[in-house]
Amino acid sequence: KKSGLRVRGQPHLLLIGDPGCGKSQFLRYAARLVPRSVHTTGIGSTSAGLTCTAVKDSGEWMLEAGALVLADRGLCCIDEFNSIREHDRATIHEAMEQQTLSVAKAGLVCKLNARTTVIAATNPKGKYDPTAGVDVNTAIASPLLSRFDLVLVLLDTADERWDRTVSTFILQKACETPGVDAGDDEAGNVRGATQSSGRPEAGGAPLPPPTARWPMSRLRAYLAYIKTTYQPSVSNDAADVLQAYYTRQRSAEGQSGARTTLRLLEALLRLAQAHARLMCRHEVTIQDAVVAVVLTEASMQTSAVLGVD
């Protein structure tokens, strides 16, 4: 606060996966959970793209906001992240780290806020090679890759049991009566999930009713409540866990330079605070720190040091 330096508190997530792994569906559902959200592609649907552009209307220049500016204090879901434009690629670094956009176009000089969480999805460059680094598989530069707190890889592996399960689910959906949605309704409930079968157990006692899922409106309200109410502080024990994992990652052999910078420690801190906020805690505990370490370790791929699968 004394120096005026802003440290972002919103984590960023990158999904890398083969085509058909459901990345776009994940982005669409995440956009429904946040009241203020923008779902776009890397190319963008307007000339503003992801950042902003200067347009001339009625003889006067004005700024047209892009996806990151429109999603201020919300969520920005970017599909096909590897196809972002060149002028967006140069300015998105500032938006993802400092959460601002410095504009100097057509005589307009200003700074726009882009305080948003970014969830991006991209396809690998050809067949994903598990032995190579993420920057090699995606052709995303290391400075941009280091701004993502978590990088999750979704692979379409050949598994007969999994293929049979997925194909059975899809075919059952196709055989249902047209116009009847047996999945989640708009409220977020699974139809029939709140109804008890009424069948007695072996001892004669009735079965307890199954736990009902929260409707979408309640889930949105809960996420908005914990985001504005809880600002957890970090306990000494949790700080020791995060520091120990960070130092081990830095000293490990074969560590990725794009993922083990000082931003790794900041990402661990953000994830631990996010989990504590999700559990309605005012202080980050050891459990929150361990969850942050497990999430980060699972996203490290070739540079994991704890062997978390």
Image (tube, grey):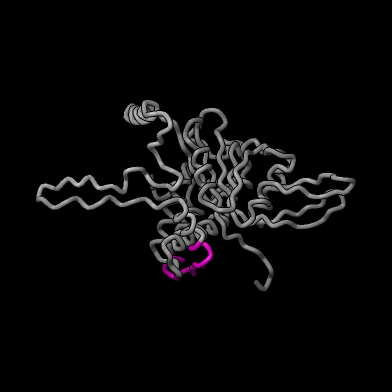
Q: In which quarter of the image is the N terminus?
A: bottom right
Q: Which residue is depicted at the point 61% across and 47% down?
A: 38
Q: Quadrant of the C terminus?
A: top left
Residue 233 sits inside the magenta stretch: yes
Q: Which residue is depicted at the point 48% across and 36% down?
A: 22
The location of residue 192, given as percent across then percent down, is 32, 43
Residue extending furthest toward the right: 59
With 237 as the anchor, is 10 left or right in this view? right
Q: Which residue is depicted at the point 50% across and 32% down?
A: 18
Q: Is the magenta stretch mostly helix, strand or loop?
A: helix
Magenta segment, which residues? 225-240
The location of residue 91, given as percent across then percent down, is 71, 48
- 170 and 24: which is toward the camera: 170
The location of residue 198, given as percent across then percent down, is 20, 47
- 17 and 181: which is toward the camera: 181
Residue 6 sits inside the magenta stretch: no
